[in-house]
Amino acid sequence: MSDSSEAIALATTQIEQALAEKTKRPTIAGFFDEATFTVSYVVHDPATDEAAIIDSVLDYEAASGRTSYGSADAIIEYVKTNNLKVTWLIETHAHADHLSAAPYLQEKLGGKLAIGSEIIRVQEVFGKLFNAGSDFERDGSQFDHLFKDGERFKVGTLEGIALHVPGHTPADMAFVIGDAAFVGDTIFMPDFGTARADFPGGDARQLFKSIRRLLSLPDDTRLFLCHDYKAPGRDVYAWESTVGQQRRENVHVKDGVTEDEFVEMRTKRDSTLDMPNLIMPSVQVNIRGGRLPTPEANGVSYIKIPVNAV
Ligand SMILES: [Fe+2]
């Protein structure tokens, strides 16, 4: 082969690689809700414009019990502006700090509502706590799809893998899509550390194992976090890092931190944390797939607060 044909062959290979890389790399938009410090994501395949919406937020004012749609409508506008076709509405877990807008988004945009299959354990625990009636099914049937650990799925031509990452709750999932991982409440920015593990069914030891599993992904995997609270010395919100950066810098779980060290730190820290402001409304709504409790005879939905039970 002459020099020039070698050069052409090389160039072709490079173009093929570049194209392959391009289709493996989803386009990602993060939407930050400062009221609950939550990041929602729209992730789409640039080749087909198929999209997944991850961890959406329904605005909720606790004092008045009013819901509103500012956060969800911003996502709808982005989806429409970019002509995206929503195929998935994914929850990484039943959040305790905000209500999900997934049913509202599904009504407006379509897509399958999905969460991890262990949600049935969370429904069991909180169904009891809230003394939910027999109309509250504890079988995950409020969702269109329940992801199992290791399950593969597609967003357009992008390959996705669902990973069960318990610890924060028993049902937490992370979703790897192309070169990006949406890690839910496991790790936060390296200067902030990790998610709490003291909710019912939470477990610091499991959380450590789940995080180390995520950190075994390739170093350049982009990690998209579910929350940010800033951190000492940092005055801007941030929600993207990489596996390599977390392994080098995460203040709770960088390489070298042992499981026992982590568990001791996490348990001590969790004992100082207050319950999230919206835990009662969030959990009651989110275990129902983001739907309000069944209205009473007067047509109004009520949120219960168990007194002295948590
Ligand atoms: Fe959470």
Image (cartoon, rainbow, N blue to C red):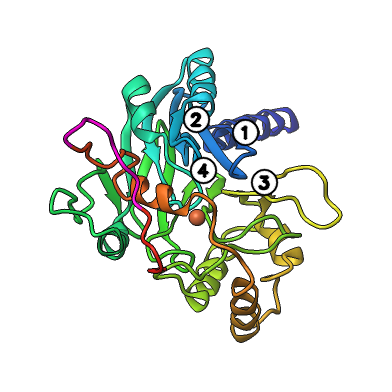
Q: Could you tell me if the residues under marks 3 and 2 are in contact, i.e. CB atoms within 8 Å?
A: no
Q: Residue at x 49, y 22 (%)?
A: 73
What is the tally of numbered marks visible in this picture? 4
- Nearer the observer: mark 4 or 1; the answer is 4
Mark-to-mark CA distance, 2 and 1: 18 Å
**First-in-chain label (4 vs 1):** 1
Asked which secondary structure carries label 3, the reply is strand
Quadrant where the N terminus lies?
top right
- Callout 2 amino acid: His
Q: Name the residue carrying label 1.
A: 18
Q: Amino acid at mark 4?
A: Gly
Q: Residues within 10 Å of mark 2 (few under 14, many from 20)?
A: many
Which residue is under mark 2?
Answer: 44
* Residue 3 image point, x, y percent: 75, 33
Main structural element of the magenta stretch: helix, strand or loop? Answer: loop
Residue placed under numbered mark 3 in the picture? 240
* Residue 298 magenta-highlighted: yes
- For disc 4, the neighbor class at 10 Å (few under 14, some 14 to 19, many from 20) is many
Q: Which residues are magenta?
A: 297-304
Give me the C-alpha separation between circle 3 and circle 1: 23 Å
For this view, does 109 lie left or right of residue 189?
Answer: left
> Where is mark 4, residue-wise?
178
Q: Is residue 208 visible?
A: yes
